Image (cartoon, rainbow, N blue to C red):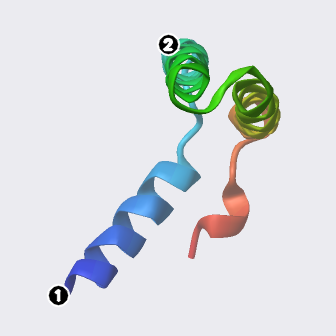
Amino acid sequence: MGILDRLEEEFVDVSTSRATLKELLELAVGSILFVLLAGGLAYYLLGRTVALAVVVVLALVFAITIVSQTYWALTGRSDYRE
């Protein structure tokens, strides 16, 4: 079994189970910390305008991810089951 097979198997395993509230909170807190750190680093290295753009883009991506994960946590992912 190759590395890609293992990754696919793990992805399907995770995708078929419903996320718990703890996992959703971990995702939210991790996302917030990542956005703050990335924004701070961008501000330090590249300036205010670039940092603001980085924060907006990352916040949008993580917001979509969190909403998606919450939806799938409520409904389940039966389409991944074989």
Q: Quadrant of the N terminus?
A: bottom left
Query: Which residue lies at the image location 82% right of the left edge and 34% below the top edge?
Result: 60
- Residue count near mark 1 (Cα–Cα under 10 Å), binned few <14, some 14–19, many ≥20: few
Dot 2: element: helix
Residue occupying the far left of the picture: 1
Would residue 64 appear left or right of 76 to someone viewing this image? right
Quick check: marks 2 and 1 in contact, CB under 8 Å? no
The part of the image, by quadrant, that contains residue 76 is top right
Return the residue at label 1. 1
Count of residue discs = 2
Identify the residue at horizontal 41%, vertical 73% (top origin).
8
Q: In the image shown, does 56 or 60 lie closer to the viewer? A: 56
Up the image or down, 39 lies above or below 65; here it is above
**In percent of the image, x 73 and y 20: which residue is there?**
48
Comparing 63 with 14, the one in front is 63
Spatial CA distance of label 2 from label 1 is 32 Å
Q: Residue flagged by tag 1: what amino acid is it?
A: Met
The foreground one among 72 and 46 is: 46
Depicted 79 relative to depicted 39: above or below: below
Q: Is residue 22 above or below residue 10?
A: above
Viewer-side residue, 58 vs 52: 52
Looking at the image, residue 10 sits to the left or right of residue 51; the answer is left
Question: In this image, 21 relative to 7: left or right?
Answer: right
Residue 45 in percent (x, y) is at 51, 30
Q: Residue at x 27, y 73 (%)?
A: 6
Image position, residue 25 (x, y; %): 56, 12
Indicate whether 80 appears above or below 62: below
Residue matched to label 2: 22
- Picture coordinates of residue 67, whole percent (x, y): 81, 31
Q: Locate the C terminus by quadrant.
A: bottom right
- Residue 39 locus on image (x, y percent): 61, 22
Mark 2 or 1, nearer chain start: 1
